[in-house]
C-alpha cells in the first residue's frame, strides 16, 4: 500500500508541474517573450525542457525524502552490490558447509544406528550373561550344599576310619596268631613224607572236553561219569572218605550245579576240570571243585607262549634242563589259560628234532641267548595238544 501511495503522489505532483509548465509556455508563446535572446519558439521549447527537468528532479527529491529505500538505492547502490556479492559468496560457502555438515550428519546417523545395533547386541549378551550368572548362582548353592554334605561325610568317614584302625589292630593281632599257627602247621606238613600226599592244592585231577550243545540230561550224565572217573583216579592214589571204600572225593554241590548249567548254556565244546582244592593225603578225602572254560583260540600260529634266557656256556646238561623248564613254563601257561590236559597234566608237545636243534644252537652260541617257545599252529583249548617249536635269538646289547 505504501508503494501505491507514493506512485500516486508522484503522478499528481508531476501532473501539476506539467500543467504549470504548459500554462507558462502558452503565456510566453502568446506574448512572444524571449529569454536569453532566444526566439519565442525556442524559448517555449526551453520552458518545456526546464519543466520536464523540474518534474524529474521533484520526483527524485520527493522519493528520496519520503523513502529510505530510494535514498539507499541512489546513494549506496555500489556498496549494496558489493555487500550482496559478499553475501552470496558467504551463502555459497555456508551452503557448502551445510552440505558437508549434512553428509557428516548422515555418517553420524549411520554410526549412531550401528552404535544402537551394537548396544542392542551387547544388551542381549548382558541378558544372556545375567541368565548364566543366575544359573551359576543356583549351581553355586548346589555346590555349597554338596560341600556341606561332603564335609559331614568326611567327618563320618574319619570316625569310621578310626574304628577301622582299631579293627585293623585287632585283626593284625589275630593274623599274627594265625601266622604262628600256619607256621606250626607248615612244620607239621614238612615233616610228612611226599609219598603221603595224593594231590597238591590246585592240582588237576582230571580234565575232559564236553559238548555244550548236548541235551541237559546228557550233560548231567556225562558230568556224573566224569566225576566217577575222577573218583576212581583218587581211589587209585589211596585217597578215601572215612567209612567208605568207594568214595574218595568230596564235591561242592553248589559248584557242581553251577557248572552243569554253564555247560548247558555253552554253544560249543567246553573244557571241564576237576581240581583239588587243598593238599590231600593218603587215607583222607580229596576236597575238589569243577572249573569250566569255553572254547577259545589260545595261541595263533607263530605266537610266543613262553620265553627264557639260557646261557649256552653252561654246558649240555644245564642247557637241556633249561629247555625242559621252558617247555614246562609253556605247559603251565596253556594250562592256566584253560587248555585241556592229559592224565599226567601235560598239554605241550615238542618233537625230538626241534628240541635237539635248539639245544645245539644254544651250546654253539657259547653265550646267553633268548629262547622262545612258539606255537606251531593255531591252538584251541578244546583241541590238544599244543605243538611247540623253539626259536633262538641273540640278546640285544
Image (cartoon, helix red, strand yellow):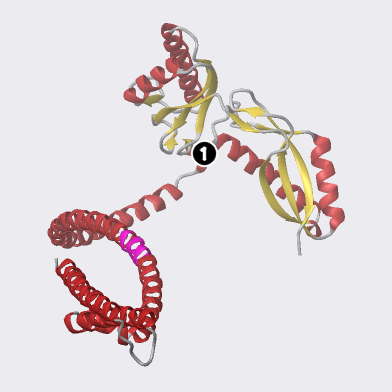
Q: Looking at the image, can residue 242 be seen?
A: no
Quarter of the picture holding the C terminus: bottom right
Q: Which is more toward the observer, 125 or 4?
A: 4
Q: Is residue 239 above or below residue 263?
A: below
Query: Which residue is denoted by mark 1 in the rendering?
Result: 195
Residue at image coords 38%, 76%: 88
Residue at image coords 38%, 64%: 107
Q: Is residue 316 above or below residue 1?
A: above
- x then y, percent, for residue 150: 17, 58
Residue 321: within the magenta? no
- x then y, percent, for residue 395: 76, 58
- x then y, percent, for residue 184: 35, 54
Main secondary structure along the magenta-highlighted residues: helix
Q: What span is colored magenta in the figure?
A: 105-113
Residue 110: within the magenta? yes
Quarter of the picture holding the N terminus: bottom left
Label 1 crowding class (10 Å Cα cut-off): few <14, some 14-19, many 20+?
A: few
Q: Which is more toward the observer, 320 or 387?
A: 387
Number of labels in the image equals 1
Quarter-of-image position of residue 354: top right
Q: Looking at the image, can residue 297 be seen?
A: yes
Residue at image coords 31%, 59%: 113
- Extreme residue toward the bottom, this view: 36
Residue at image coords 67%, 27%: 385
| Secondary structure state at the residue bearing disc 1 | helix
- Extreme residue toward the right, this view: 364
- x then y, percent, for residue 112: 31, 63
Q: Which is more toward the observer, 389 or 239?
A: 389
Q: Which is more toward the observer, 202 or 393?
A: 393
Quarter-of-image position of residue 93: bottom left
Amino acid at each position: 500500500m505504501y508503494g501505491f501511495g507514493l506512485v500516486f503522489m508522484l503522478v499528481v505532483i508531476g501532473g501539476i508541474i506539467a500543467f504549470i509548465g504548459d500554462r507558462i509556455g502558452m503565456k510566453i508563446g502568446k506574448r512572444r517573450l524571449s529569454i536569453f535572446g532566444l526566439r519565442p519558439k525556442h524559448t517555449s521549447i526551453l520552458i518545456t525542457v526546464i519543466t520536464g527537468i523540474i518534474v524529474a528532479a521533484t520526483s527524485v527529491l520527493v522519493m528520496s525524502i519520503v523513502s529510505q529505500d530510494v535514498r539507499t538505492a541512489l546513494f549506496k547502490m555500489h556498496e549494496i552490490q558489493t555487500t550482496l556479492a559478499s553475501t552470496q559468496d558467504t551463502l555459497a560457502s555456508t551452503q557448502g558447509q551445510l552440505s558437508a555438515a549434512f553428509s557428516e550428519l548422515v555418517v553420524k546417523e549411520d554410526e549412531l544406528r550401528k552404535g544402537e545395533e551394537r548396544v542392542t547386541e551387547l544388551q542381549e549378551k548382558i541378558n544372556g550373561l545375567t541368565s548364566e550368572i543366575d544359573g551359576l548362582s543356583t549351581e553355586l548353592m548346589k555346590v555349597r550344599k554338596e560341600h556341606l554334605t561332603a564335609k559331614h561325610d568326611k567327618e563320618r568317614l574319619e570316625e569310621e576310619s578310626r574304628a577301622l584302625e582299631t579293627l585293623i589292630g585287632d585283626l593284625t593281632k589275630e593274623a599274627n596268631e594265625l601266622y604262628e599257627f600256619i607256621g606250626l602247621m607248615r612244620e607239621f606238613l614238612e615233616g610228612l613224607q611226599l609219598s603221603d600226599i595224593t594231590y597238591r592244592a590246585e592240582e588237576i585231577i582230571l580234565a575232559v572236553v564236553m559238548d555244550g550243545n548236548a541235551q541237559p540230561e546228557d550233560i548231567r550224565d556225562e558230568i556224573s561219569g566224569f566225576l566217577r572217573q575222577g573218583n576212581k583216579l583218587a581211589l587209585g592214589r589211596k585217597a578215601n572218605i572215612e567209612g567208605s571204600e568207594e568214595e574218595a572225593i568230596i564235591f561242592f554241590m553248589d559248584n557242581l550245579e553251577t557248572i552243569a548249567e554253564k555247560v548247558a548254556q555253552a554253544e560249543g565244546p567246553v573244557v571241564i576240570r576237576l581240581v583239588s582244592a587243598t593238599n590231600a593225603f593218603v587215607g583222607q578225602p580229596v576236597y575238589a571243585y569243577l572249573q569250566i572254560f569255553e572254547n577259545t583260540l589260545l595261541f595263533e600260529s607263530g605266537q610266543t607262549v613262553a620265553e627264557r634266557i639260557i646261557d649256552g656256556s653252561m654246558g649240555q646238561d644245564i642247557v637241556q634242563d633249561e629247555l625242559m623248564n621252558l617247555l614246562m613254563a609253556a605247559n603251565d601257561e596253556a594250562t592256566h589259560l584253560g587248555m585241556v590236559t592229559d592224565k599226567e597234566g601235560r598239554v605241550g608237545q615238542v618233537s625230538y628234532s626241534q628240541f635237539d636243534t635248539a639245544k645245539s644252537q644254544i651250546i654253539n652260541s657259547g653265550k646267553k641267548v633268548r629262547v622262545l617257545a612258539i606255537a606251531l599252529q593255531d591252538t584251541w583249548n578244546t583241541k590238544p595238544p599244543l605243538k611247540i617249536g623253539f626259536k633262538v635269538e641273540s640278546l640285544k646289547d
